[in-house]
Amino acid sequence: MATRRERERGSSRSDTGARLLAAIPAIAFALFIVSQGGLVFAIGLILLGIVAMGELFHMMERVRPAALAGFLALVALCLGALYGDQYQVVLVLAASVPVTFVLSLLRPRREHISWAMAVVFLGILWIALPIAHAVLLRELPHGGGLMLDVLIGTFLNDTCAYFAGRAWGTRPIAPRISPNKTLEGLLGGIVGGTFFFWLFAIAYQHDWFKGPDALLIGFCVALVAPLGDLFESALKRDLDVKDAGRFFGAHGGVLDRLDGVLFTVVVAYYVSRAVIG
């Protein structure tokens, strides 16, 4: 008979294979919109953002947030980032406050209006604003390559953290939020995410991306990616839900897959502007 450890390893390999299989369409979609850039990229992100915000609003539906306000802010922020710059993004962000208030007043029920507006503002700041930064990042010179680097660094950070945690993890870093996350996994993810960001950059983008610059940006991306994961885990723990949605079937929703990216694209944009120009 198979031992318990052997069964766990078999289950882990099966789960990893299923995750990779489920990720193939998402990877193809990401590669397509990143390669196209411009309006195609913005529209693709808007669609993902609407699903992600819908998951957030569904988790907090008891306060009946004015979802339309969040969706409008998302579209406006992305278009502002595409056809303008940070100035237009800030203008849209400021305008989202009175718009959210008015649309919250128009709800059939006016109970919990403070919490309802807070949920919408959370969606705007946590989901819509980072997605707008992804558009800003893609619009930079060599933005397509930078966006691919960020995705590689973010997702391989998570993968390396998972395997390092399973192999050596003994010290939990946030037992009340995510008991399975360990210090060893965190360090493995940071090292792995930084390495693969740097490796892809020097292997395929060496004509414009210097090794030290790639190492610095990759380290910053790998450093904040776990924070995005912990941020969403804290919300789900507080709301007592396992997954944010079912967009990817048994592997969760859009928020479950993009929680790290929502943090890394913002950091990557500003560090890239500072380092590369």
Image: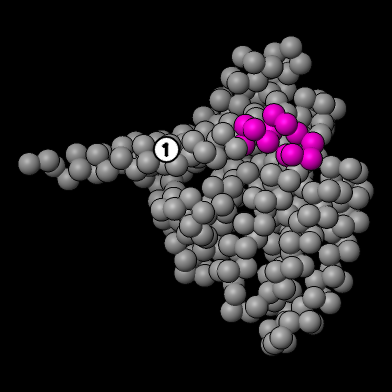
Q: Residue at x 45, y 42 (%)?
A: 22
Q: Is residue 96 above or below residue 143?
A: below
- In the picture provided, is 173 more to the left or to the right than 29? left
Q: Residue at x 87, y 71 (%)?
A: 98
Query: Furthest residue to the top?
Result: 207
Q: Is residue 158 visible?
A: yes
Query: Furthest residue to the left?
Result: 1
Q: Circle 1 sits on which residue?
A: 21
Q: The C terminus appears in which quarter of the rendering?
A: top right
Would residue 35 be counted in the magenta stretch?
yes
Q: The N terminus appears in which quarter of the rendering?
A: top left
Q: Is residue 176 visible?
A: no
- In the picture provided, is 203 more to the left or to the right than 92? left
What colour-coding does the image apply?
Answer: one colour
Q: Position of residue 97 (x, y in %)?
A: 84, 68
Q: Position of residue 235 (x, y in %)?
A: 56, 63
- Which of the 4 image quarters holds residue 170? top left
- Which of the 4 image quarters holds residue 202? top right
| Magenta span of residues | 30-41
Q: Residue at x 19, y 39 (%)?
A: 6
Q: Residue at x 71, y 86 (%)?
A: 108
